[in-house]
Image: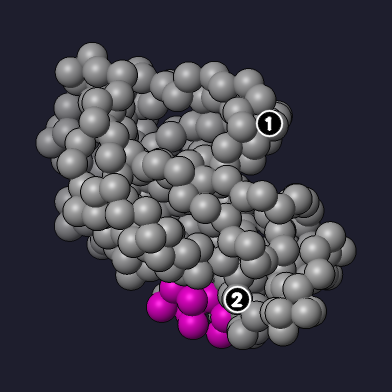
């Protein structure tokens, strides 16, 4: 997992925000050497993004922060209706991106005469938010949004009214609240990091056989600690989350492909077709075949 790190104060500042509704087949256009940070938060659907060769499959409650100076685009079109929020911000400070959560940055400013101590703001490049946190952040972004894109209307970007209007102080206060919600905090950092690391591992490896020992190895901790940290962050176990991730991918394949249930079971990490059908029915109340008939 990579992190964007910068010294604060001064804090990053809000530029503008909006939302976008994409149809199946639509995609995020390519931007080279973009000069702002760009936060993407998917509310529903799936967005396929690539930044300087790193691919990200963003599903509901997934957040990605794209950095200035990099090239980003879609690496494939959306395969289902997708609604996401975006927010642009910038900073006057230098920033670094690395895979270490610890370690202070060298400050080029001296605030000692004002009795101000700079700290390091650490933002995960990509993370999956808990349901409660996603709702909170979406509410903030809705308040800040002044633009909207609706591909059904063939619109590029149209202005929309927002609650705070041109009140820049209010906008910045809301943006700082958002940063506080998504940043890696100093308190409980290790447990929070372990949970996010495990969730990222599950999202990237759901189609393989995944054991608790595999998760512990990915997070560099004891298996029991994995369960404890994951439950504290997401209020469920890693095993149950893995099942939900697999079922979500299976539902997409049932809706958007002609693969047999046996092939879908294999592609989504279920050991057998029979076990896939059993788990699917237990969780959704209908069989995979019935679900496909209902959606197609």
Colouring scheme, one of rainbow, by chain, secondary structure, one colour: one colour
- Left or right relative to 211: residue 166: left
- Tag 2 residue: 185
Give the percent coordinates (x, y) of residue 19: 31, 38
- Tag 1 residue: 70
Which residue sits at x=44%, y=73%? 234
Dot 2: few (<14), some (14–19), or many (≥20) neighbours within 10 Å? some
Looking at the picture, does residue 28 appear above or below residue 276?
Answer: above
Q: Secondary structure at mark 2?
A: loop
Closer to the camera in the image, 132 or 59: 132
**Image quadrant of residue 42?**
top left
**Image quadrant of residue 148?**
top left
Dot 1: few (<14), some (14–19), or many (≥20) neighbours within 10 Å? some
Give the percent coordinates (x, y) of residue 69: 69, 32
Name the mark on residue 180.
none
Which residue sits at x=56%, y=84%? 228
Q: Secondary structure at mark 1?
A: loop
**Image quadrant of residue 107?**
bottom right
Does residue 175 show up magenta in the picture? no
- Left or right relative to 157: residue 111: right
Q: What secondary structure prevails in the magenta region? A: helix
First along the sequence among labels 1 and 2: 1
Which residue sits at x=24%, y=26%? 158
Observer able to see residue 226: no
Observer able to see residue 148: yes
Which residue sits at x=66%, y=25%? 33
Alpha carbon distance from label 1 to label 2: 26 Å
Which quadrant of the rendered structure holds the N terminus?
bottom right
First to last magenta residue range: 228-235
Closer to the camera in the image, 77 or 275: 77
């Amino acid at each position: 997992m990579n992190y964007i790190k910068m010294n604060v104060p001064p804090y990053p500042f809000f530029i503008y925000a909006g939302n976008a509704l994409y149809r199946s087949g639509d995609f995020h256009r390519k931007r080279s050497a973009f000069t702002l940070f760009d936060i993407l938060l998917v509310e529903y659907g799936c967005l396929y993004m690539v930044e300087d060769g790193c691919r990200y499959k963003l599903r509901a409650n997934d957040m990605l922060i794209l950095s200035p100076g990099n090239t980003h685009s879609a690496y494939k079109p959306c395969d289902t209706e997708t609604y996401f929020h975006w927010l642009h911000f910038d900073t006057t400070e230098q920033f670094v991106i690395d895979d270490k959560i610890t370690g202070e940055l060298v400050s080029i400013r001296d605030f000692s005469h004002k009795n101000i101590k700079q700290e390091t703001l650490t933002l995960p490049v990509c993370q999956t938010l808990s349901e409660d946190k996603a709702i909170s952040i979406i509410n903030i972004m809705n308040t800040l949004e002044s633009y909207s894109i609706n591909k059904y209307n063939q619109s590029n970007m149209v202005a929309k009214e927002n609650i705070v209007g041109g009140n820049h102080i209010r906008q910045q206060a809301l943006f700082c609240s958002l940063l506080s919600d998504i940043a890696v905090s100093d308190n409980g950092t290790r447990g929070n990091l372990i949970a996010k690391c495990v969730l990222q591992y599950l999202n990237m490896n759901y189609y393989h056989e995944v054991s608790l020992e595999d998760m512990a190895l990915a997070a560099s901790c004891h298996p029991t600690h994995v369960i404890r940290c994951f439950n504290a962050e997401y209020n469920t176990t890693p095993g149950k989350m893995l099942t939900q991730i697999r079922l979500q991918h299976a539902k997409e394949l049932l809706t958007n492909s002609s693969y047999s249930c046996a092939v879908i079971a294999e592609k989504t990490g279920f050991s057998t077709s029979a076990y896939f059908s059993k788990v699917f029915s237990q969780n959704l109340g209908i069989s995979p075949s019935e679900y496909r008939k209902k959606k197609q």
